[in-house]
Amino acid sequence: MPATDRVKLHELYFQPLLSQEAIHQRVVELGKELHDRLDSGDPSFIIMLKGAFVFAADLVRASRLSGEIGFVRTSSYSGTETEGEVRLLIPPEEDLIRNKDVVLIEDIIDSGLTMRSFLPKLRKMSPRSITLVTLLHKPQAQRVDVAIDLIGFTIAPKFVVGYGLDYDGLGRQLPAIYQLEEAY
């Protein structure tokens, strides 16, 4: 993507990081990996809202797996910074979890705090297995260990938007991923 493709959301500017084509290619690869891991069953896809909805739709189709879909919503961000405290706004449906192979789809894992808070709640619902898939991982920003099964892209610890991720409600519709520009 040329540098002229920068976008402005609220008062901040973002520059291209991952193209629509690169994302599509990686999602297809992740879908194949997921299919190879879970080919023998009908997993429950649990999608972390709001950010993972675009990635999840593409990943579920790319996996060619059948299975039910459920949603979970947590909150830990304020503006461009994680607050550290994770709130469960929409809990998972237990009938989609108990004795099922669960594919937990997340948009981004940075601090790891959301998963550290959420995974024990999910495990208490007695899934057969949990496969954690994230589109983006920021290992340099990670504060707690999280076992991630499939990672789309490893990126620097900069704030990103697009392909479902937002900055205070804006940018989810962008087909590519953009990172916050450095101050000049």
Image (cartoon, rainbow, N blue to C red):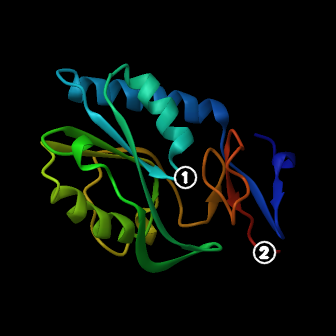
Q: Classify 106 as above or below 156.
A: above
Residue under the image location 71 percent in, 44 percent down = 173
Res 26 seen here: no
Q: Earlier in the sequence, mark 2 or mark 1?
A: 1
Residue 131: x and y in percent read 25, 43
Query: Which element type, helix, strand or loop, lies under badge 2?
Result: loop
Dot 2, how many residues are within 10 Å of its Cα: few (below 14), some (14-19), or many (20+)?
Answer: few
Quarter of image, res 30: top left
Q: Which mark is residue 51?
A: 1
Q: Residue at x 25, y 56 (%)?
A: 147
Q: Nearer the viewer, residue 158 or 184?
A: 158
Residue type, label 1? Gly
Q: Which mark is residue 183?
A: 2
In this view, the residue in front, 39 or 181, is: 39
What's the CA distance linking mark 2 and mark 1?
Answer: 25 Å
Q: Nearer the viewer, mark 2 or mark 1?
A: 1
Quadrant in the rendering for residue 181: bottom right
Task: Judge whether residue 184 can be spotted in this image.
Answer: yes
Q: Position of residue 60 (x, y in %)?
A: 42, 29
Say which mark, if any, is on residue 149.
none
Residue at 41 percent across and 74 percent down: it is 86
